[in-house]
Amino acid sequence: MAEIKTQKRKRKKRVPKNETRSDRWRRLVGERSNKFVHHVKLLKNLRSSAYDPDPEMEQELFAKFEEELRALKAVWKLDPESEEEEAEEQEETTAAEDEDSEPPQKVATVSEDSDSDW
């Protein structure tokens, strides 16, 4: 009878039960950023002479990458352009609210040394 060989499953990394939110963030951002850098390197390999790149598709890809990176920076509040856009939107909203509201009414004040008969 032939012996059946089985593959061993990769062992999952054990996460400490007392891991804080900060520690978890550091662990996950480290893993994910390493994966990102690895995939960027793989994409760089596609520019070698072994392939025939499509310039139109390259432009589309880079536009998408830049869009996603801008969105990431906006979420992490790292993009000064997105902060400026948010500030402009806030100013426009405030200006629109001011236009819709009634102008402040003048209040008559009476000074103590006036000769009026109130």
Image: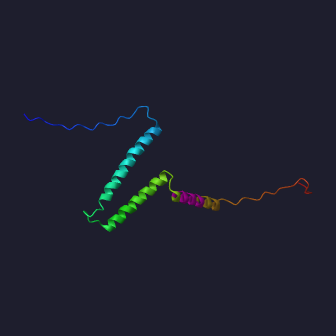
Furthest toward the left, the residue is 1
Q: What x and y, as percent, mark residue 83?
A: 54, 56
Residue under the point 34% across and 64% down: 58
Q: Main secondary structure of the magenta part?
A: helix
User: In which quarter of the view is residue 116 placed?
Assistant: bottom right
The x and y percentages for residue 97 are 62, 59
Relative side of 1 to 50, left or right: left
Residue at far top of view: 18
| Residue 63 position by quadrant | bottom left
Q: Is residue 84 left or right of residue 40?
A: right
Residue 87: in magenta span? yes
What residue lies at 43% left-to-right and 39% top-to-bottom? 24
Residue 65 higher or lower than 25, as above or below: below
The residue sitting at 45% across, 55% down in the picture is: 71
> Which region shows up in magenta?
82-92
Examine the structure image and report whether residue 42 is included in the region drawn in magenta. no
Question: Of all residues shown, which one is farthest toward the front?
Answer: 49
**Where residue 82 appears, x then y in whole percent?**
51, 58
Which corner quadrant holds the C terminus? bottom right
Question: Could you say which quadrant of the image residue 1 lies in?
Answer: top left
Label total for image = 0
- Residue 79 or 91: which is nearer the viewer? 79
Direction from residue 116 to residue 19 in the image, left or right: left
| Residue closer to the observer: 57 or 96 | 57
Question: Does 7 appear above or below 97?
Answer: above
User: Nearest the camera: 84 or 43?
Assistant: 43
Q: Residue at x 32, y 37 (%)?
A: 12
